[in-house]
Amino acid sequence: MNEVFPDPDGILPVDKPAGLVSHAVVSTLRRRFGFSKVGHGGTLDPDATGLLPILLGKGTKISDRVMGGDKTYTGTVRFGERTATQDRLGEVLERRPTDALTEAQILEAIRRDFVGDLFQKPPMYSAVKIDGQPLYRMAMRGEDCEREERFVHVYAFRVLAFRPDPVAAEADIEVRCTKGTYIRTLANDLGEAVGTGAHLRNLRRIASGCLDLSRAVRFADLLDMSRAEVAARVIPCAAYLDGRC
């Protein structure tokens, strides 16, 4: 039974596991702790892991600021396979050999086409709405539609490791970018740029605004905490707005 303790106000950084939609984290915390106002500061795909800012109390009033922060991700790109969803969950649409692919080719493509100001077309398997309908629902019915390209900025796109392979070469990457950047679309487009096709195998958000994973609580650990322990991990709104995360 929860002890009597007022609802906290601010941002609770949570390390989201794979297999949960962002809203499921919100609804679970609302039920578990009885918080009256709970939201999140930036959706993660169900298969993605990492930093999910949970907004509590008055923290929900600064959702635009939290969502608008720059993001940093790590992930793995698999070359040689293009999928319907641009990640590992989608049907493989095409396979191409990767025996001739080199790290130098990948780095050159990144330098030439994937750093700086970019225009991205949202993938069909996304929560973007057109005429009030999420694109992923249309995609699940086998439909396609015109999507307006969106302006994003990639500050840095690094290759952390490259593993050559004749049929499924992989690269571990780190990307720092503005909000709204689809990392799986970067992976898909990078695969086209080097001629092999590609998709994103995994994704982890390691920073959002002034928050990073060092302040985050694992979701499973959070469920074993008391309301007082949760409140002690909440970053006050003023501290976040001042960049004192």
Image (cartoon, rainbow, N blue to C red):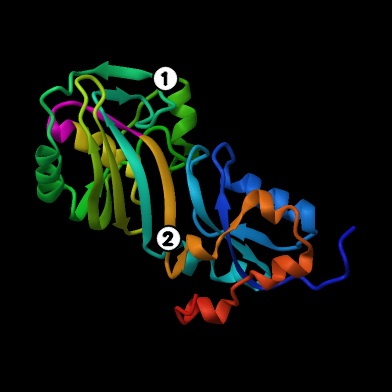
Q: Secondary structure at mark 1?
A: loop
Q: Which image quadrant is residue 6 in?
A: bottom right
**Where residue 142 is drawn, which disc sits there?**
1
**In front: mark 1 or mark 2?**
2
Quarter of the image that includes the N terminus: bottom right
Position in image of residue 113 (x %, y %): 13, 47
> Which amino acid does the dot numbered 1 rest on?
Gly
Label 2 environment density (alpha carbons within 10 Å; few <14, some 14–19, many ≥20):
many
Q: Is residue 229 left or right of residue 52?
A: right
Q: Secondary structure at mark 2?
A: strand
| Residue 44 visible to the viewer | no
Position in image of residue 242 (x %, y %): 47, 82
Q: Is residue 157 magenta?
A: no
- Residues at marks 1 and 2, CA–CA distance in whole angstroms: 35 Å
The span picked out in magenta is 192-200
The residue nearer to you, when weighing 243 against 98, is: 98
> Which amino acid does the dot numbered 2 rest on?
Ala
**Where residue 207 is drawn, which disc sits there?**
2
Q: Is residue 188 left or right of residue 42?
A: left
Label 1 environment density (alpha carbons within 10 Å; few <14, some 14–19, many ≥20):
few
The residue nearer to you, when weighing 174 against 146, is: 174
Q: Which image quadrant is residue 187 in?
A: top left
| Residue 208 visible to the viewer | yes
